[in-house]
Structure formats: structure tokens, C-alpha cells
Amino acid sequence: MDLRAIAADVPDYSGYPSLDELSASSRELAAEFPDVVRLRTVGRSSAGDDIECLTVGDGARSAVVYGVPNSNEPVGTLTIEYLARRLCEDVSLRAELDFTWHFVKVADPDGLRLNEGWLSPPITLTSYHRHFFREAMEEEADLNFPISYRGLVFDRPPAETRALMAVIDEAEPDFCYPLHNAEIGGTFYYVSERCAPLYSLLQELPSWFGLHLSPLPGPNPGDSVFAPGIGPLPSMTGVYDLLAESGVADPASAPLLAGHGGLISDYLRRFGTFCLLSEVAPFDDPRSGDLSLSSVTRAEVLAACVEVLGASAVLAERFAGFEPVLRRDTRLRRAVRHSLEMYGFLAAQQRDALAALVDGDEVATVAEWHRVVFLRGVVQRVRGMFVRMLDVELADRPAGAAVAGLVGARAEVAAEFEAEAVRLEREVPPASPVRSLVGAQVCAGLAAAAYVRDHRPCRRGGAGVAVS
């Protein structure tokens, strides 16, 4: 398999397709290759949109690949668009890999629709934040798999998760590839097991597309980093154990675990599946991987993180003050509430880390300082959702004291949004070419499939072929 040739073949996409365009493309592919493709509906979203699965080929091994695991992560839709067509057209590649491919382009149709305002060009950081939507954790397709572990029990998966479960249960996959993408930063990977033959290629792939390898964000429960930019696949069982070891009396009630289920890693454990997450950043920033020393100390980094997250506390106070007069229980409202709760939790973590810092005068790396920029983007996106939430709430609502208060709050947050947008546009690199993000995911996924073919037993036999 010539990955360099495949990388060169990825089209120069200008933006991301809408949900309706993705569905139409699947129907066209199934009609064009009726002997290779099977298209079926595997569930319906909470709002009633079809969740479709496109099955390509009939190989000895099985792979499940899904896009939009979180509603603001559309890169994987085009990764699947390319892979599905390439595997239909390239008979030799399909035979060489010897997989049956199950593609779910959109795991969260409702969430993708709420992000469609920023999917068309020109894609800027401001348009992304202005039209951003990220669902509350209890509504995430990729974070609500059934789980029963020690004190952590969850058995209420939403419709979107149930659709993924149906595909996984049928396929019993040898390989699973959830197509996440990050935001402001670089490329990094999570894998379900140590896979040394893959490391050097995964680390090199970002450079093929003008992207940058980034250190893993935050702690990695249950294990150490496997290699620069590559670490163990997170799991809710790992988070539970980490909280328990740190002295939390009831880990299941902690903000990181309460109210939702397990990750894909928790669900795949029963099948022994190899899983890869390839996180690419639409706003690729080389500072996220710069390990040279900055001009600030680690104490200053933590203090700046606390200050940035403090802005979310002001938003939380506003929200708490007028939430009793809100009439519409929308996904936007639930997302704003959840985001503000989580940012409060993160702020407390940063304050604790600052208080516990032994050597506050130690100089931070550029990558550590870059976390401040990332957190500013995180707070900015909730400002965008906040304004959108109030726009929905105020639509067709008659005038009154409550409405006047909501209008005033909207104006204040909108002004803060616009001021921060100007600053962030100056400080964050422009959006990376969509082709680069898709190409990096395509090549990483094909390399991982070849790894599974060559290094894991096949249920029905098969031979290995080299990757270049």
C-alpha cells in the first residue's frame, strides 16, 4: 500500500458537507457500486434524522469507522467520504487490506445540523465560535455507552449511541476508528494497545500535510505516554480509578463521570478490538508542540489558566440569574449549562494545581503556555452558544421585564464575544486546509488497518502485505 500516493490523491476540499449532502452522497455511492456497497438505516437521532451505515466490501476482517462523534467534529465526514469511494474504486486496495468496512458518516445528526453555520468557506476561528455547538456530556454519542464498573453504573444510552452499538454489535470489529478532531493545537493519537510498528509513521504523518505533532493534552489515566504524541486510549474505568486513587470518596458522582456513560474504549473491551483515535486540529498551531522554554514560569501559566476560566464564572452567574425565566429546553441551553459547570470544575483543578506547585519558578515550555490560548478558545465557544441560546429564546417572545433582561444579557455577552474574537484572530493561525486534516486521518486509518491485518489474528485467515 503506497500511502504517499494516497496522500497525494486526497482532494482539495474547501469546506465540509451538510448532513443532507452527506446522505445524498451515500445514496449515490450505493447506486454506483451496488455489488460493493450496502446502505442501511441503523437508528434515528433524538430529533428524528436517520443514522445511516455504509458497508463497503466483504473482507475477512471488520472495521467500524464513524464521524461526528462530537457534534463540532466534522473532519471525519470527509475522511469517510474519501475512504468509502477510494475503497469502492480501488479493488486492489480493498483486497490488500481485506476488511469489511462499516462507515457511519454522522453519529450525531442533530448536533451536526447545529454546527452547519460554520462548515462552508471561508472557515475562520470567529465563524467557528459564532456558530459552534458542542453537546452536553449526557447527550454525546461517543460518551454514553453502557458501563458497569465498581460504583460506576450507566445503562441509558441515547438514540445516537444505540445506533453505534447496533453497528458494533453486528460487526464485532477487529478495528475501530472514531474520527475525532481537536480545535486549536496539533495532531495526536490514542491507541488501545502498545503498537510500536505504527509509532514512527503516525508521528511522521502530520508533516506530510503541513501539520504538527502535539503532546497529549492533560493526564492519561491508567498508563504512561507510549511515544511522543501517542498514548493510551482514555476510558471511564481509567478515570474512575484515577479519582479513587486521588482520594475522591465517590468517583461516580464527580463531574467527569456523573450523569453519563462509558467511552468507546469501555464498550469495545468485550470484543478485543484495536482502536485508534487520530485527533487533528482545524486550527493547527505549532506552539502546541513546541517544547522549548518560554518566557513565563509554570506558576504564571496556571495563574493565567485560572484567570481565563474565571471569565466562565461570570457567564455562569449571568446564566444562573436568568435561567428561571427561560422557557425553551433546547440542546443549546443544556450545552451552555453543562459547559459552564465543567469550566467551573476545571478552574478549581487549576487553582488546586497552582496551590500544590512545588517549584513555581520553573520555566514553562511554549507548549504549556499555549494551553492558555486553547482555554481562551474554549471559553469563547461557550460565549457563542450563549448568544445563540438567547436568540432562540427571544424569537417571537413578547416584550416584558424578563425579555428586557435577556436582551441586555445577550448584548453584554455578544460584545465580549466580538472583542475576544478580534484578539484570537490575531493570535491563532488561520484554519488549516481541510485537505490536510482529512489526509492525515485517511493515512493514519489505513496504516492502522494494515497494522491490524499484519499483527493481529484474523478470524477467517488472511495474509499480510507491507505498507510504505
Image (spheres, rainbow, N blue to C red):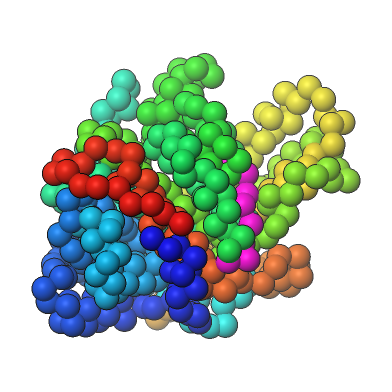
Looking at the picture, tell me which residue is in the foreground, 356 or 298. Answer: 298
| Residue at 49% from the left image edge and 73% from the top image edge | 8
Looking at the picture, tell me which residue is in the foreground, 223 or 71. Answer: 223
Q: Is residue 456 above or below residue 396?
A: above
* Residue 192 is at least partly visible in this image: yes
Most common secondary structure along the magenta stretch: loop
| Residue at 75% from the left image edge and 44% from the top image edge | 291
Asked whether, in this view, residue 13 is left or right of residue 281, the answer is: left
Residue 344 located within the stretch drawn in magenta: no
Asked whether, in this view, residue 238 is left or right of residue 187, the answer is: left
Q: Residue 349: x percent and y percent?
A: 62, 34
Q: Is residue 85 above or below residue 178?
A: below
Looking at this view, name the residue that lies furthest to the left.
Answer: 35
| Residue at 58% from the left image edge and 63% from the top image edge | 208
Stretch of the chain drawn in magenta: 209-216
> Which quadrant does the N terminus fall into?
bottom left
Q: Quadrant of residue 211?
A: bottom right
| Residue at 78% from the left image edge and 42% from the top image edge | 365
Asked whether, in this view, residue 236 is left or right of residue 172, the answer is: right
